[in-house]
Every structure is written in C-alpha cells, then in structure tokens.
Image (spheres, rainbow, N blue to C red):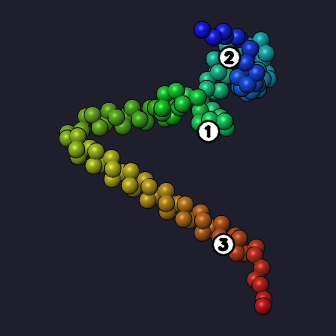
Amino acid sequence: MGHSTAYHPQGNGLVESSNKSLVNIMKKLLEINKKSWHRRLVHGVWADWVSQKKSIVTSQFELVYGVDTIFPTSLVSLVIKLLQEANSEEDPMQRRLNQMVHLQQTREEFFKNTSKLQEKIEKIYDRKAKADKF
C-alpha cells in the first residue's frame, strides 16, 4: 500500500489558481461593504462555479451536470413553454416535429443575421482598403 500526503505541488498550484479567481470575485462583491462577506460568499462561489474556465473550456457546473446553467429569468419562459406544450392536444410525434421546425427556423434566422453582419464587416473593410494599381 502506497503512502499518501497532503502536499502535491502541481495540484496545489491548480487549487491556488482557482482560489485566486474566487478571491477576485469576492473582492469585487465586497468593494462597498466588507462586513457582509458571509452573506455574499454564496453568490461569489456560485459565480465562480458557473463561469467558464480557460483550462477546461467550460464551467465547472457544466462539467459536473452535463448541461449549461439556466438562470431564473430564463427559467420562467421555459416553464411557461413547457406548460403550454403539456396542455396542448398534440401527440408526442407532432410535438417533436414542431420542435424540429422551430429549431430549423431559429438556425435559418441565425444564419441570415450572421450573413448580414459579415456583409457589413466586408463593406467597412472594402471602404478602408485601397485599390492596388498595377
């Protein structure tokens, strides 16, 4: 049986780096009133937990639960939509087809908006670019 130790330089460095981001979040939260740290700690830990980390390219929350966080403001619209779908008389197959159609429409709208943005950027670039004369 191997022995274990609490000291591990590589792991301790990662923990210190993670703690440093939490300390920075807490400093920002406590700029006005430092005495309320015990009430703000929960919010600081939550902000650290759901923020995207460069090292893992995702949030810790998403890494653990496999889904992105849903904040209460966006949760309300999802619950209302779910209740409306549950009260409808559609069968599950029709509901799924409607969801697929809605998803395709959203993708097309996104593509259209992206194309418009690319055209604007291209026009701005073309205005600033000088024509080469040979």
Q: Residue at x 44, y 55 (%)?
A: 107
N-terminal of the two: label 1 or label 3?
Answer: 1
Going by the numbered disc 3, the residue's amino acid type is Lys
State if disc 3 and disc 1 touch (CB < 8 Å): no
Residue 91 visible in the displayed image: yes
Quarter in which the C terminus is drawn: bottom right
Q: Residues within 10 Å of mark 2 (few under 14, many from 20)?
A: some
Q: Residue at x 27, y 34 (%)?
A: 86
Going by the numbered disc 2, the residue's amino acid type is Leu
- Give the label, 1 or 2, closer to the camera: 1
Q: Against 105, is 131 above or below?
A: below
Quarter in which the N terminus is drawn: top right
Q: Residues within 10 Å of mark 1 (few under 14, many from 20)?
A: few
Could you tell me residue 79's position as x and y percent? Answer: 39, 32
Q: Against 105, is 25 above or below?
A: above
| SS under mark 1 | loop
Residue that carries the numbered disc 2 in the rendered image: 41
Q: Residue at x 27, y 49 (%)?
A: 97
For marks 1 and 3, give the CA distance: 33 Å
Residue 25 visible in the displayed image: no
| SS under mark 3 | helix
Q: Against 102, is 80 above or below?
A: above
Going by the numbered disc 1, the residue's amino acid type is Val
Please tell me which residue lies in front, 50 or 106.
50
Residue 118 horizontal side relative to residue 108, left or right: right
State if disc 2 and disc 1 touch (CB < 8 Å): no
Q: Against 72, is 37 above or below?
A: above
| SS under mark 2 | helix
Residue that carries the numbered disc 3 in the rendered image: 123
